[in-house]
Image: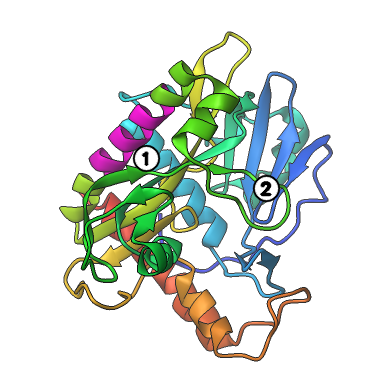
Protein backbone atom coordinates (compact mmCIF):
# COMPACT_ATOMS: atom_id res chain seq x y z
CA UNK A 1 0.00 0.00 0.00
CA UNK A 2 1.30 3.45 -0.91
CA UNK A 3 0.62 6.80 0.74
CA UNK A 4 -0.54 8.61 -2.40
CA UNK A 5 -3.64 10.50 -1.31
CA UNK A 6 -6.92 9.58 -2.94
CA UNK A 7 -10.13 11.57 -2.82
CA UNK A 8 -11.51 11.22 0.71
CA UNK A 9 -14.60 9.08 1.22
CA UNK A 10 -17.07 10.71 3.58
CA UNK A 11 -20.40 8.96 2.90
CA UNK A 12 -21.55 5.69 1.31
CA UNK A 13 -25.15 6.54 0.41
CA UNK A 14 -24.49 5.35 -3.15
CA UNK A 15 -24.48 1.67 -2.12
CA UNK A 16 -27.63 -0.37 -2.95
CA UNK A 17 -27.54 -2.36 0.30
CA UNK A 18 -29.50 -2.23 3.57
CA UNK A 19 -27.56 -0.21 6.12
CA UNK A 20 -26.92 -2.10 9.36
CA UNK A 21 -25.35 0.70 11.36
CA UNK A 22 -23.69 4.07 10.87
CA UNK A 23 -20.88 5.00 13.26
CA UNK A 24 -18.61 7.99 13.67
CA UNK A 25 -16.17 6.54 11.15
CA UNK A 26 -17.57 3.27 9.77
CA UNK A 27 -20.62 2.47 7.68
CA UNK A 28 -21.90 -1.08 8.12
CA UNK A 29 -24.12 -2.89 5.60
CA UNK A 30 -26.14 -6.05 6.16
CA UNK A 31 -25.48 -9.03 3.87
CA UNK A 32 -27.47 -11.60 5.83
CA UNK A 33 -24.91 -13.83 7.56
CA UNK A 34 -22.13 -11.31 7.05
CA UNK A 35 -21.51 -7.57 7.14
CA UNK A 36 -19.66 -5.09 4.97
CA UNK A 37 -17.58 -2.69 7.11
CA UNK A 38 -16.49 0.44 5.27
CA UNK A 39 -14.00 2.78 6.94
CA UNK A 40 -14.61 6.33 5.74
CA UNK A 41 -12.14 9.19 6.11
CA UNK A 42 -14.22 10.88 8.79
CA UNK A 43 -12.50 11.72 12.04
CA UNK A 44 -14.08 12.33 15.43
CA UNK A 45 -12.86 14.05 18.56
CA UNK A 46 -14.60 14.71 21.86
CA UNK A 47 -17.53 12.60 20.59
CA UNK A 48 -18.09 14.91 17.61
CA UNK A 49 -17.52 14.07 13.96
CA UNK A 50 -15.42 16.85 12.46
CA UNK A 51 -16.48 18.42 9.16
CA UNK A 52 -13.01 17.93 7.64
CA UNK A 53 -12.00 14.40 6.55
CA UNK A 54 -8.46 13.00 6.68
CA UNK A 55 -7.62 11.61 3.21
CA UNK A 56 -6.59 7.90 3.27
CA UNK A 57 -7.52 7.48 6.94
CA UNK A 58 -10.05 4.73 6.20
CA UNK A 59 -7.54 2.89 4.06
CA UNK A 60 -4.98 2.91 6.88
CA UNK A 61 -7.53 1.72 9.46
CA UNK A 62 -8.60 -1.15 7.22
CA UNK A 63 -5.09 -2.20 6.22
CA UNK A 64 -3.84 -2.18 9.81
CA UNK A 65 -6.87 -4.11 11.05
CA UNK A 66 -6.32 -6.75 8.37
CA UNK A 67 -2.63 -6.89 9.27
CA UNK A 68 -3.27 -7.41 12.98
CA UNK A 69 -6.13 -9.90 12.50
CA UNK A 70 -3.78 -11.97 10.35
CA UNK A 71 -0.77 -11.63 12.64
CA UNK A 72 -2.64 -12.39 15.89
CA UNK A 73 -5.25 -14.76 14.50
CA UNK A 74 -3.53 -17.72 16.14
CA UNK A 75 -4.46 -16.25 19.54
CA UNK A 76 -8.20 -16.01 18.98
CA UNK A 77 -10.75 -16.36 16.16
CA UNK A 78 -11.79 -13.08 14.53
CA UNK A 79 -14.55 -11.87 12.23
CA UNK A 80 -12.56 -10.90 9.11
CA UNK A 81 -13.43 -12.93 6.00
CA UNK A 82 -11.90 -10.87 3.18
CA UNK A 83 -10.72 -7.44 2.09
CA UNK A 84 -10.77 -8.39 -1.60
CA UNK A 85 -13.53 -6.54 -3.51
CA UNK A 86 -13.92 -9.64 -5.71
CA UNK A 87 -15.45 -11.36 -2.67
CA UNK A 88 -18.00 -8.62 -2.08
CA UNK A 89 -21.61 -9.05 -3.26
CA UNK A 90 -22.51 -8.45 -6.89
CA UNK A 91 -24.58 -5.37 -6.03
CA UNK A 92 -21.49 -3.42 -5.01
CA UNK A 93 -19.12 -4.54 -7.77
CA UNK A 94 -19.77 -1.33 -9.77
CA UNK A 95 -18.38 0.56 -6.77
CA UNK A 96 -15.32 -1.64 -6.23
CA UNK A 97 -12.88 1.20 -6.88
CA UNK A 98 -14.44 3.31 -4.13
CA UNK A 99 -14.53 0.39 -1.68
CA UNK A 100 -11.12 -1.13 -2.37
CA UNK A 101 -8.64 -0.78 0.45
CA UNK A 102 -11.16 0.51 3.00
CA UNK A 103 -13.69 -2.33 3.24
CA UNK A 104 -13.83 -5.59 5.20
CA UNK A 105 -16.25 -8.46 4.66
CA UNK A 106 -16.83 -9.88 8.14
CA UNK A 107 -18.87 -12.48 9.97
CA UNK A 108 -21.98 -11.16 11.65
CA UNK A 109 -21.96 -11.45 15.43
CA UNK A 110 -23.87 -10.21 18.42
CA UNK A 111 -21.41 -7.67 19.88
CA UNK A 112 -20.80 -7.88 23.62
CA UNK A 113 -21.82 -4.66 25.40
CA UNK A 114 -18.34 -3.87 26.73
CA UNK A 115 -15.08 -2.46 25.44
CA UNK A 116 -12.05 -4.41 26.61
CA UNK A 117 -9.30 -1.89 27.34
CA UNK A 118 -5.67 -2.76 28.04
CA UNK A 119 -3.35 -0.13 29.53
CA UNK A 120 0.40 -0.58 29.67
CA UNK A 121 1.35 3.00 30.52
CA UNK A 122 -0.07 5.82 32.60
CA UNK A 123 -1.67 8.23 30.16
CA UNK A 124 -4.85 10.04 29.22
CA UNK A 125 -7.80 9.56 31.54
CA UNK A 126 -5.83 6.94 33.46
CA UNK A 127 -3.15 9.48 34.36
CA UNK A 128 -5.77 12.03 35.40
CA UNK A 129 -7.49 9.51 37.66
CA UNK A 130 -4.21 8.32 39.19
CA UNK A 131 -3.12 11.91 39.83
CA UNK A 132 -6.41 12.48 41.66
CA UNK A 133 -6.94 9.16 43.49
CA UNK A 134 -3.83 6.98 43.19
CA UNK A 135 -5.90 4.47 41.23
CA UNK A 136 -6.80 3.66 37.63
CA UNK A 137 -10.31 2.33 37.15
CA UNK A 138 -10.39 1.21 40.77
CA UNK A 139 -6.97 -0.50 40.66
CA UNK A 140 -4.56 0.91 43.26
CA UNK A 141 -1.10 1.72 41.88
CA UNK A 142 2.22 2.46 43.62
CA UNK A 143 2.71 6.08 44.69
CA UNK A 144 5.04 8.41 42.85
CA UNK A 145 4.35 7.34 39.28
CA UNK A 146 4.79 9.99 36.59
CA UNK A 147 2.73 10.70 33.51
CA UNK A 148 3.59 8.17 30.77
CA UNK A 149 5.35 5.81 33.20
CA UNK A 150 5.17 2.15 32.31
CA UNK A 151 2.79 0.37 34.66
CA UNK A 152 4.09 -2.47 36.86
CA UNK A 153 1.95 -4.78 34.71
CA UNK A 154 -0.69 -4.16 32.04
CA UNK A 155 -4.15 -3.38 33.38
CA UNK A 156 -7.48 -4.65 32.10
CA UNK A 157 -10.02 -1.84 32.46
CA UNK A 158 -13.37 -2.62 30.79
CA UNK A 159 -15.90 0.05 29.83
CA UNK A 160 -19.49 0.16 28.73
CA UNK A 161 -20.15 1.00 25.09
CA UNK A 162 -22.19 4.17 24.83
CA UNK A 163 -24.30 4.79 21.71
CA UNK A 164 -23.83 8.52 22.32
CA UNK A 165 -21.52 10.41 24.65
CA UNK A 166 -18.64 8.95 26.61
CA UNK A 167 -18.06 5.30 27.47
CA UNK A 168 -18.11 4.59 31.19
CA UNK A 169 -15.38 2.64 32.96
CA UNK A 170 -16.65 -0.30 35.00
CA UNK A 171 -14.97 -2.75 37.34
CA UNK A 172 -14.26 -6.36 36.47
CA UNK A 173 -16.93 -7.36 39.02
CA UNK A 174 -19.50 -5.20 37.24
CA UNK A 175 -18.48 -6.73 33.93
CA UNK A 176 -18.84 -10.22 35.39
CA UNK A 177 -22.33 -9.36 36.65
CA UNK A 178 -23.32 -8.39 33.10
CA UNK A 179 -21.65 -11.19 31.16
CA UNK A 180 -21.00 -13.96 33.64
CA UNK A 181 -17.70 -14.62 35.40
CA UNK A 182 -16.43 -17.24 32.96
CA UNK A 183 -16.91 -15.05 29.88
CA UNK A 184 -15.56 -11.98 31.69
CA UNK A 185 -12.46 -13.92 32.69
CA UNK A 186 -11.95 -15.14 29.14
CA UNK A 187 -12.22 -11.59 27.79
CA UNK A 188 -9.70 -10.30 30.33
CA UNK A 189 -7.26 -13.07 29.44
CA UNK A 190 -7.66 -12.49 25.69
CA UNK A 191 -7.35 -8.73 25.99
CA UNK A 192 -4.10 -8.87 27.95
CA UNK A 193 -2.63 -11.59 25.71
CA UNK A 194 -3.43 -9.63 22.54
CA UNK A 195 -2.08 -6.42 24.06
CA UNK A 196 1.22 -7.84 25.34
CA UNK A 197 1.88 -9.72 22.09
CA UNK A 198 1.15 -6.65 19.97
CA UNK A 199 3.13 -4.36 22.27
CA UNK A 200 6.25 -6.53 22.00
CA UNK A 201 5.95 -6.58 18.21
CA UNK A 202 5.38 -2.81 17.98
CA UNK A 203 8.32 -2.02 20.26
CA UNK A 204 10.65 -3.96 17.98
CA UNK A 205 9.58 -1.49 15.26
CA UNK A 206 10.12 1.61 17.33
CA UNK A 207 6.57 2.16 18.58
CA UNK A 208 5.25 1.95 22.13
CA UNK A 209 1.70 0.63 22.34
CA UNK A 210 0.53 2.64 25.33
CA UNK A 211 -3.04 1.37 25.43
CA UNK A 212 -5.72 -0.05 23.18
CA UNK A 213 -9.29 -1.30 23.17
CA UNK A 214 -10.76 -4.50 21.77
CA UNK A 215 -14.30 -5.55 21.00
CA UNK A 216 -15.70 -9.06 20.87
CA UNK A 217 -18.90 -10.68 19.66
CA UNK A 218 -20.68 -14.03 19.65
CA UNK A 219 -21.43 -15.61 16.27
CA UNK A 220 -24.56 -17.71 15.54
CA UNK A 221 -22.66 -20.87 16.50
CA UNK A 222 -21.84 -19.44 19.94
CA UNK A 223 -18.17 -18.80 19.11
CA UNK A 224 -16.42 -15.82 20.67
CA UNK A 225 -14.85 -13.65 17.95
CA UNK A 226 -12.57 -10.61 18.00
CA UNK A 227 -14.48 -7.98 16.01
CA UNK A 228 -14.52 -4.36 14.83
CA UNK A 229 -11.04 -2.85 14.29
CA UNK A 230 -7.68 -4.14 15.43
CA UNK A 231 -4.99 -2.02 17.05
CA UNK A 232 -5.43 0.99 14.77
CA UNK A 233 -4.51 4.61 15.59
CA UNK A 234 -8.23 5.20 16.23
CA UNK A 235 -8.45 2.49 18.89
CA UNK A 236 -4.92 2.65 20.27
CA UNK A 237 -2.35 5.11 21.56
CA UNK A 238 1.07 4.71 19.90
CA UNK A 239 4.22 6.60 20.95
CA UNK A 240 7.64 6.93 19.33
CA UNK A 241 10.03 4.77 21.37
CA UNK A 242 13.01 6.95 20.46
CA UNK A 243 11.58 10.20 21.84
CA UNK A 244 9.61 8.60 24.71
CA UNK A 245 10.36 10.07 28.13
CA UNK A 246 8.13 9.68 31.19
CA UNK A 247 7.08 12.79 33.07
CA UNK A 248 5.24 14.39 30.15
CA UNK A 249 2.73 13.47 27.47
CA UNK A 250 4.68 11.89 24.59
CA UNK A 251 3.96 12.80 20.98
CA UNK A 252 1.52 10.24 19.63
CA UNK A 253 0.66 8.66 16.30
CA UNK A 254 -3.09 8.67 16.87
CA UNK A 255 -5.76 11.35 16.66
CA UNK A 256 -4.52 12.91 19.90
CA UNK A 257 -2.71 15.30 17.57
CA UNK A 258 -6.12 16.56 16.39
CA UNK A 259 -7.45 16.74 19.95
CA UNK A 260 -4.42 18.81 20.97
CA UNK A 261 -5.11 21.26 18.15
CA UNK A 262 -8.78 21.53 19.09
CA UNK A 263 -7.80 22.26 22.70
CA UNK A 264 -6.14 25.47 21.49
CA UNK A 265 -9.49 26.77 20.20
CA UNK A 266 -12.39 28.34 22.07
CA UNK A 267 -14.74 25.55 20.87
CA UNK A 268 -16.96 24.22 23.68
CA UNK A 269 -16.69 20.59 22.41
CA UNK A 270 -20.32 20.50 21.33
CA UNK A 271 -21.59 20.17 17.75
CA UNK A 272 -20.97 21.62 15.30
CA UNK A 273 -17.25 20.94 15.43
CA UNK A 274 -14.87 23.42 13.77
CA UNK A 275 -13.13 22.60 10.47
CA UNK A 276 -9.48 21.58 10.48
CA UNK A 277 -6.86 23.69 8.67
CA UNK A 278 -4.99 22.05 5.82
CA UNK A 279 -1.74 21.85 7.78
CA UNK A 280 -3.41 19.85 10.58
CA UNK A 281 -5.12 17.57 8.06
CA UNK A 282 -1.85 16.77 6.26
CA UNK A 283 0.12 16.29 9.48
CA UNK A 284 -2.56 13.93 10.79
CA UNK A 285 -2.57 11.98 7.53
CA UNK A 286 1.22 11.59 7.72
CA UNK A 287 0.96 10.22 11.29
CA UNK A 288 -1.57 7.56 10.26
CA UNK A 289 0.61 6.47 7.33
CA UNK A 290 3.78 6.41 9.43
CA UNK A 291 2.09 4.12 11.96
CA UNK A 292 1.11 1.76 9.16
CA UNK A 293 4.54 1.70 7.53
CA UNK A 294 6.40 1.20 10.79
CA UNK A 295 4.20 -1.68 11.92
CA UNK A 296 4.02 -3.53 8.61
CA UNK A 297 7.60 -3.24 7.40
CA UNK A 298 9.38 -6.62 7.04
> Which residues fall within the magenta stretch?
186-198
The span from disc 2 to disc 1 (Cα, nearest Å) is: 25 Å
Give neighbour class at mark 1: few <14, some 14-19, many 20+ (Cα, 10 Å).
some
Give neighbour class at mark 2: few <14, some 14-19, many 20+ (Cα, 10 Å).
few
Of marks 2 and 1, the one in the foreground:
2
Can residue 82 be seen in this snapshot? Answer: no
Answer yes or no: do the residues labelled 2 and 1 have beta carbons within 8 Å?
Answer: no
Task: Please state the horizontal and vertical placement of residue 289, each as a whole percent of the image.
Answer: 40, 64
Task: Please state the horizontal and vertical placement of residue 117, each as a whole percent of the image.
Answer: 43, 45
Residue at 64 percent across and 46 percent down: it is 38
Q: Is residue 246 left or right of residue 226?
A: left
Residue nearest the observer in this picture, 4 or 259: 259
Q: Which mark is residue 68?
A: 1
Q: Which mark is residue 162?
A: 2
Residue at 29 percent across and 71 percent down: it is 147
Taking 228 as reference, is 262 above or below it? below
- Is residue 195 one of those drawn in magenta? yes
Taking 291 as reference, is 33 above or below it? above
Residue nearest the observer in this picture, 109 or 286: 109
For the N terminus, the image quarter is bottom left
SS of the residue under disc 1: helix
Residue at 43 percent across and 40 percent down: it is 66
Residue at 57 percent across and 66 percent down: it is 6
Task: Please state the horizontal and vertical placement of residue 285, each as a whole percent of the image.
Answer: 48, 71
Amino acid sequence: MTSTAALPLIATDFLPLPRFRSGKVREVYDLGNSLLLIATDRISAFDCVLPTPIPDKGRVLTALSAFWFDRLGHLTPHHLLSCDPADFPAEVQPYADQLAGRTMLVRKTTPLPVECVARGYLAGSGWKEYHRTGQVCGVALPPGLREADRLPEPLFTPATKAAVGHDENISFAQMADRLGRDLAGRLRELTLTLYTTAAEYALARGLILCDTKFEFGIDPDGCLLWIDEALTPDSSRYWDAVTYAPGRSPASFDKQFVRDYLETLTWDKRPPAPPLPEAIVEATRRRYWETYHRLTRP
